[in-house]
Amino acid sequence: MHHYDVAAKVLIDTCRDQILRCFLHLDVDQSTLIENLPQETVSVKRSDFPMLVTDSTGQQLIVILEIQTQWHPHVPLHLLDYRIRHLISKNLPVISAILLLKPDARATDCYEDKEVSFRYRLVRFSEMDARVAVEQWPHCLLPFVPLLKHGPELTPQVERMIYDEPIPRPTKADMLTSMTILAGLVSDRLPLEILSRRRDIMVESAAYDIIKQEGFQQGMQQGIQQGMQQGIQQGIQQGIQQGLLTASKEALIDILVQRFDEVPVSFLKDIDRIDNVFVLKTLHRIALKTPSLESFRQDLDRALQ
């Protein structure tokens, strides 16, 4: 699952300077993402973000920011690789940092072997206090709150703060979508609850579209991988079927939200249980005309029998 990388990319795009100031304590006047080094390809699934940062005195430096869902032993080496390549390319001072989204006792801010000693900044979200964040952080950083200490219980409050904030609607949609994705790292319940209340605006987020597309592609890929063992043709068919299921479920939920604003979490869970595209398409046609959620509930129950 790479949705967490998508959420991180959205937040980097929308509040890059605030992330550098709040988490790395840098004096940032402006920053820009650096284009990939030669022979690299662009992907929404990348977790490294090289930036050219200018401070208030006009001095420039490179910041290599790596966002990791969980710790892997190779992360420091990957970071060191990027540091060296950008140092050679730009010939500017470099700061290297890792934002660790989930707690892990193995995580460290230093890599050493017989030849190399490499220190970098390690930001552990699990050690930050959500109560402080709600009071002091810029609003664009609030999507990180579910990951913090006391974060899950404060997430509904933060959701309302973001929803009520007088900011452009697309920005608000991106923030709510990113927070919903990140909440999935600490809770199975929170993302469904936020979706049931805020899908009306979240569907306007570019991240939401990326997630739906990735869900389709992931279904294709899983089917193809299974096909390597069970037969290529069968695997492709399974991938197509999984992708169609994902798209059909999303389309059904979207029409319910458009018609009735809020959809109970129980509806979302039951729709996710359906594994028949024909049934989902039938329910979609019913949802377009049903007079109420109560009436649709009866049709949904029949489909589940």
Image (cartoon, rainbow, N blue to C red):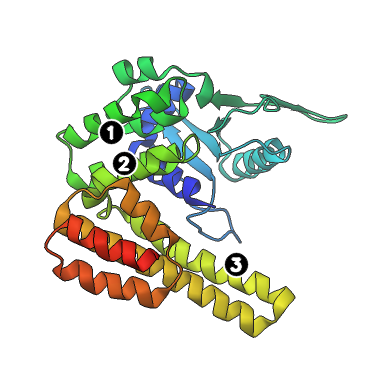
Q: Nearer the viewer, mark 2 or mark 1?
A: 2
Q: Residue 248 placed where, x, y %?
A: 36, 69
Sequence-first tag of 2 and 3: 2
Give percent across and percent down for residue 61: 50, 32
Q: Amino acid at mark 3?
A: Gln
**Secondary structure under the numbered disc 2 in the rendered image:** helix
For badge 2, the amino acid type reads: Ile
Q: Residues within 10 Å of mark 3 (few under 14, many from 20)?
A: some
User: Disc 2, disc 1: CB below 8 Å?
Assistant: yes
Is residue 178 something one can see in this rendering? no
Distance from disc 2 to disc 3, alpha carbons, whole Å, reads: 28 Å
Q: Which residue is mark 2?
A: 194
Q: Residue furthest right?
A: 114
When the figure is inspected, residue 58 is found, relative to residue 283, above or below; the finding is above
> Helix or strand or loop: what does disc 1 sit on?
helix
Which residue position is annotated with label 3? 222
Nearer to the camera, 211 or 272: 272
Q: Position of residue 114 (x, y in %)?
A: 88, 29
